[in-house]
């Protein structure tokens, strides 16, 4: 009788342990529900611009895709290449299937220098899927205003500094004695837009890439 | 005798600085992990990053930088309220035993109107740094996709 009781007790304890173990495993492996990203109202909106083929496009052309939008210009030697490098690494963290649902868009704030073809070639160096947008000054200013972004020239004349004022040892590339290069300060925010083109998050290159990717996946999974 | 001893000691105290005069003006500048970032083929500029150290016992000021690959400026990027601006620095003073790290979104060397025949994959760029005391120091910086200072 004692032997049977001991056996039953032991069996009971084993079953109990198994139940606890299964429960623990379930909790441990359960995916953390992603937090919902609130719509940031007042930031963003429909705009038109020119793509690398000089075709007019609208933001709504990207409906159904998650968009990461950034501002910059090609004469920017530090921040913009660094930002595009960051976006390149971010994009690589996505699966090929996920990449199909995402668009990385870089809008120039220097449309005089950055023609549609030029800005597209610039961003394509970082990833051939990246989209460079230019347009008229009016179009660019409208996009900047919609996203509450900003840009300012760092020189007196329209954002350009004469390169002859800069110490140089190599001969100028052109015969223009007033050869210039553009310098601007500009917003460095990375705007995360959902599939309805609504702004859902403002990020920076300081955002850990895994965290940024989780937010992109969150939006990709939204119905 | 006592007075003579004190006189000798005083004279020694007075002339010692002159005996080591050259050393007190000496500056020792070192460069570490310098690289020039490979830009898109259509870009007119790029940046160089690295670490400059003053390992000496005296201040020294960087007064000019030149390169065989383009025009050069020393800049500092600052991000304030989500907007980045660049500050041009005409010179930079290194205090004794201090270093300056040039890295993205911070201090950097900006090269403009660059020569893509020099700044190319596996290329090397000559950067010449002129200091008030240390004089001209040449650094051969490799062209890289990422800043070398980010490597461990």
Image (spheres, coloured by chain):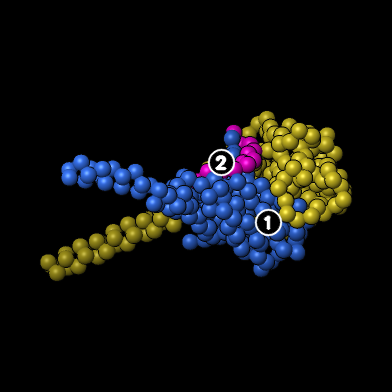
Chain colours: A yellow, B blue
Question: The residue tagged with tag 1: helix, strand or loop?
Answer: strand
State whether residue A219 appears in this view.
no
Quarter of the figure with residue B68: bottom right
Nearer-the-camera pick, B137 or A101: B137
* Residue drawn at x 83%, y 48% as measured from the top left: A116
Please tell me how crowded label 1 is: few (under 14), some (14-19), or many (20+) other residues with Cα within 10 Å. Answer: many
Q: In the rendered view, would you say B152 is above or below A66?
A: below
Q: Nearer the viewer, mark 1 or mark 2?
A: 1
Q: Badge 2 is on which residue? A: A36
Q: Main secondary structure of the magenta part?
A: strand
Label 1 in the same subunit as label 2? no
State whether residue B80 appears in this view.
yes
Q: Chain of mark 1?
A: B
Nearer-the-camera pick, A82 or A131: A82
Q: Chain of mark 2?
A: A
Q: Which residues fall within the magenta stretch?
A: B81-94
Q: Which mark is residue A23?
A: none
Q: Position of residue A60 (x, y in %)?
A: 78, 42
Q: In the rendered view, would you say B146 is above or below A49?
A: below
Q: Badge 1 is on which residue? A: B67
Q: In the rendered view, would you say B124 is above or below B88?
A: below
Q: Position of residue A38 (x, y in %)?
A: 59, 36
- Please count the marks in the image: 2
Q: Position of residue A92 (x, y in %)?
A: 62, 59
Q: Cα distance, mark 1 to mark 2? A: 51 Å
Nearer-the-camera pick, A171 or A209: A171
* Residue drawn at x 67%, y 53% as measured from the top left: B66
* Residue drawn at x 74%, y 36% as measured from the top left: A155
Which corner quadrant holds the N terminus of chain B? Answer: top left
């Amino acid at each position: 009788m004692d032997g049977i009781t001991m056996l039953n007790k032991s069996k009971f304890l084993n079953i109990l342990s198994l139940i606890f173990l299964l429960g623990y495993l379930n909790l441990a492996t359960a995916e953390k529900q992603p937090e919902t990203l609130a719509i940031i109202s007042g930031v963003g909106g429909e705009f038109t611009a020119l793509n690398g083929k000089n075709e007019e496009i609208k933001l709504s052309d990207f409906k159904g895709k998650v968009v990461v939008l950034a501002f910059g210009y090609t004469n920017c030697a530090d921040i913009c290449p660094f930002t595009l490098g960051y976006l390149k690494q971010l994009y690589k963290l996505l699966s090929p299937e996920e990449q199909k649902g995402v668009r990385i868009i870089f809008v120039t704030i220097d449309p005089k220098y950055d023609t549609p073809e030029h800005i597209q070639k610039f961003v394509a160096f970082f990833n051939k899927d990246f989209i460079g947008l230019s347009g008229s000054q009016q179009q660019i200013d409208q996009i900047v205003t919609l996203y509450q972004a900003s840009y300012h020239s760092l020189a007196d004349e329209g954002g350009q500094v004469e390169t002859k004022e800069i110490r140089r040892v190599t001969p100028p590339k052109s015969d223009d004695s007033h050869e210039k290069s553009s310098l601007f300060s500009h917003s460095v925010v990375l705007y995360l837009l959902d599939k309805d083109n609504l702004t859902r998050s403002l990020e920076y290159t300081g955002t850990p890439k895994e965290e940024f990717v989780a937010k992109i996946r969150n939006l990709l999974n939204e119905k | 005798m006592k007075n003579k001893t004190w006189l000798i000691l005083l004279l020694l105290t007075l002339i010692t600085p002159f005996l080591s005069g050259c050393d007190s003006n000496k500056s020792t500048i070192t460069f570490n992990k310098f690289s020039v970032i490979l830009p898109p083929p259509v870009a007119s500029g790029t940046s160089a990053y690295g670490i400059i150290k003053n390992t000496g016992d005296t201040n020294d000021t960087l007064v000019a930088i030149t390169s065989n690959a383009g025009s050069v400026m020393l800049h500092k990027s600052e991000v304030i309220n989500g907007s980045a601006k660049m500050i041009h620095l005409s010179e930079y003073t290194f205090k004794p035993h201090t270093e300056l790290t040039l890295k993205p979104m911070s201090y950097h060397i900006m090269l403009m109107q660059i020569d893509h025949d020099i700044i190319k994959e596996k290329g090397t760029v000559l950067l010449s740094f002129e200091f008030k005391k240390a004089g001209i120091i040449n650094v051969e910086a490799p062209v890289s996709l990422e800043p070398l200072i980010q490597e461990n």
